[in-house]
Amino acid sequence: MTVNQIADQTPFTTADGSTIRSILDRTNAPVEEQSLAEATLPPGGATERHYHLVSEEFYYILSGDGIMEIEGETREVGPGDAILIPKGDWHQIRANESVELKLLCCCSPPYSHEDTYFSKEH
């Protein structure tokens, strides 16, 4: 049985610029098919617009609010919103100016820096 405590996970910055704590992934559990992390953006902060060639993502907003953009479509998001990001879709999330944005991010297959692209040339 694997049980990880988020408080025990060391935060790091991903290739897209968000600060995350891996809750369950290949670095801290015998994970094969998915990963789960908590991501945080400071007030007014944003991820760099990017896509993943092989990973499908779910975002689940825990606190704060912001703007989600996927393939040019934007929407305000806040606590309780679950967002599907299909593999290959350009996306970016931005926290509103007044509050930190905290979300869960689930990737399948598991997140990797190598699967984060900032241009169509890969």
Image (cartoon, helix red, strand yellow):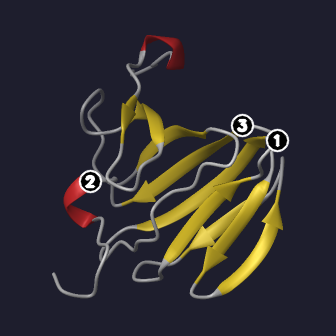
Of badges 1 and 2, the one in the foreground is: 1
Q: Badge 2, how many Cα within 10 Å: few under 14, some, many 20+? A: some
Q: Badge 1, how many Cα within 10 Å: few under 14, some, many 20+? A: few
Q: Which residue is mark 1?
A: 98
The dot on residue 15 is: none
Tag 1: residue type? Ser
Q: Position of residue 113 (x, y in %)?
A: 25, 54
Front-most of residues 4 and 112: 112
Mark 1 or mark 2: whose residue is earlier in sequence: 1
Q: Residue at x 41, y 25 (%)?
A: 11
Q: Which residue is mark 2?
A: 112
- Quarter containing the C terminus: bottom left
Of badges 3 and 1, the one in the foreground is: 1
Q: Badge 3, how many Cα within 10 Å: few under 14, some, many 20+? A: some
Q: Are marks 3 and 1 in contact (CB under 8 Å)?
A: no
Could you say whether the residue bearing mark 3 is in a helix, strand or loop?
loop
- Residue 44, compared with residue 57, is above or below; it is above
